[in-house]
Image (spheres, grey):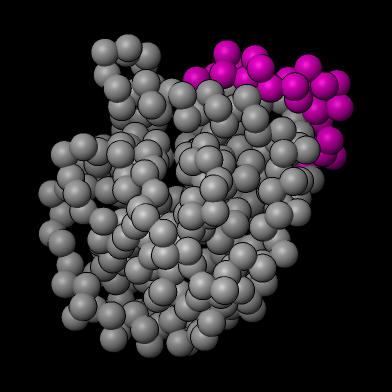
Amino acid sequence: MKIKPDSPVSMIDPSLLLRPEAKYDDKPVEAFRDYNIDENDPIKMRVRKTYYDMHTNMTVDFVKSKMEKWLKFNHFKATVKDALIKLNDLVDESDPDTDLPNIVHAFQTAERIREEHPDEDWFQLIGLMHDLGKVMAFYDEPQWCVVGDTFPVGCKWGKSIVYGDDSFQRNPDTYNPKYNTEHGMYKPKCGLENLMMSWGHDEYLYRVLVHNKSKFPKKALYMVRYHSFYPWHAGGDYKHLLVESDNDILEAVLEFNKYDLYTKSAGVPDIEALWPYYEKLIDKYIPGVLEW
């Protein structure tokens, strides 16, 4: 099986839309992540609908069902390069002013990392691959379970989750006493890696890398799995569930997120000229045809 060669999939990625430009790196999240409701702004309304749909449907049972579906890794087989090229068929509707394909963002991120971390080739490759989990969109997954910020299910919703409690009013887990307390189904200080995260492209790619026995260091896998977990690494929520060693994961995620910025003003890299370099990295860390 290969990746479906069908027509492009339209997608709005709210995490890309609402992520800060580099000049805002030192400002708090509230300064740049604008989730105000504006019925005259179609992009804001699409983002709002994406998150409300996500927060309505993202239950413990739903996440388990997606794990059951996707963690068989029987949907298609493809190399990393083939999957990256396929991402060109994802149309990001969050920015009507640019028609840069997704693969350009991947190479921009990788090249930024390469400039500042020339000796950490695994880090560069993670920058290139970090959005690959979005291939789920080619298999009829609604975008609200592919993109956007992530959070744990099975416990009280974090205070800094975008759109807040109102967006969870129709989620049945909000009213389930097994899941709606501070700790919910978890033990205190259970640790980040023991949380069941909302389903999306981050968790899926992490699982793909583990299943296919990639040679990345653990730090790289943490970057993939948790870089969209904004309620934790930007909002400071869920500390009661964390352990001291999770601070190392936090440090890795924050380092990665400095580079995962979508800026139209950034130069478009010469992708064809860069492929030989990154193909060597792919062969080193995650070679061959993968099961997805």
Q: Is residue 168 above or below residue 133?
A: above
Point 38% across, 26% down: residue: 46
Instruction: Find residue 101 and report its horizontal and vertical position in percent.
Output: 26, 56
Point 64% across, 78% down: residue: 213
Q: Residue furthest front?
A: 6
Q: Is residue 95 left or right of residue 90?
A: left
What is the quadrant of the C terminus in the image? bottom right
Q: Nearer the viewer, residue 278 or 30?
A: 278
Q: Is residue 49 above or below residue 283?
A: above
Q: Is residue 185 magenta?
A: yes
Instruction: Find residue 211 and report its horizontal and vertical position in percent.
Output: 67, 72
Point 53% across, 82% down: residue: 289
Instruction: Find residue 5 and report its horizontal and vertical position in percent.
Output: 42, 65
What is the quadrant of the N terminus in the image? bottom right
Instruction: Find residue 50 and report its horizontal and vertical position in percent.
Output: 47, 30
The boundaries of the magenta stretch are: 160-189
Q: Is residue 169 magenta?
A: yes
Question: Which quadrant of the figure has residue 113?
Answer: bottom left
